[in-house]
Image: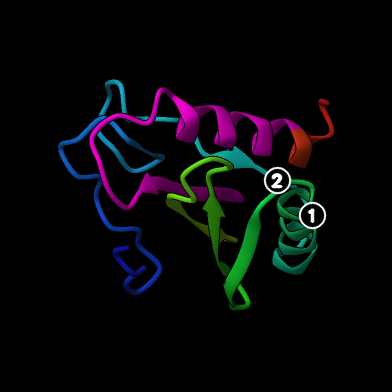
Amino acid sequence: MTKNTAGRLAPCPKTPNCVSTLAPPGKQHMDPIPYKGSVEQARQRLLSALRGFERVTLVEEGPDYLHAEFRSRLFRFVDDVELVVDDQTKLIHFRSASRIGRSDFGVNRQRMEKLRRDFLGQR
């Protein structure tokens, strides 16, 4: 896992098992999640959305930063999800990456698409 540094997320590795709002245009890129209201309101909605997932553990909570670990059902592989709430732009940036291996069969992208839907109330 590569830790968030000064409000920035680490770049994705060259393997296809990572998505990020800060990745250059291409297969690893996803758009940030827009929000309205305060950072704390966005943070609480993110926490609620994260808690809706199975096999998730919140490992770090800051005022504008969250880090969660997701474990796969069968082999218990760990994926790291980091989220940064940027109050200046009213955008939530994220990075979701597998710790090991090359392929994730699209799991990180699917997870972040679901998180976006849940956060925006688009179930």
> Image height check: is 42 above or below 49?
below
| 14 or 36, nearer to the observer | 14
Q: Position of residue 108 (x, y in %)?
A: 47, 35
Kindly indicate whether the residue at mark 2 contacts the one at mark 1 (C-beta within 8 angstroms).
yes
Q: Quadrant of residue 13?
A: top left
Callout 1, which amino acid? Arg
Residue under the point 62% across and 68% down: 58
Q: Is residue 116 left or right of residue 60?
A: right
- Amino acid identity at mark 2: Tyr
In the picture, the quarter occupied by the N terminus is: bottom left
Query: Which badge, 1 or 2, is on the more N-terminal residue?
Result: 2
Q: Which quadrant of the view contains residue 8?
A: bottom left
Residue tagged 1: 45
**Could you say where residue 40 lies in the image, as x and y percent from the top left?**
75, 69
Residue found 84% across the figure and 34% down from its top: 121
In magenta stretch: residue 91: yes
Res 110 label: none
The boundaries of the magenta stretch are 90-117
Residue 64 against residue 112 in the figure, above or below: below
Q: Nearer the viewer, residue 35 or 23?
A: 23
Answer left or right for 18 relative to 47.
left
Q: Nearer the viewer, residue 24 or 113?
A: 113
The crowding category of the residue bearing disc 2, from other C-alpha atoms within 10 Å (few below 14, some 14 to 19, many at least 20), is: some
Is residue 73 magenta-colored? no
**Which residue is at 71% across, 52% downward?**
50
Which residue is pictured at 33% across the width and 69% down the height?
A: 3
Work out how far the residue at label 1 is from the one at label 2, CA to CA, in angstroms: 10 Å
- Residue 86 position in % (x across, y down): 54, 59
Q: How many marks?
A: 2
Q: Which element type, helix, strand or loop, lies under badge 1?
A: helix
Residue annotated with mark 2? 35
Which quadrant would the C terminus be assigned to in this image?
A: top right
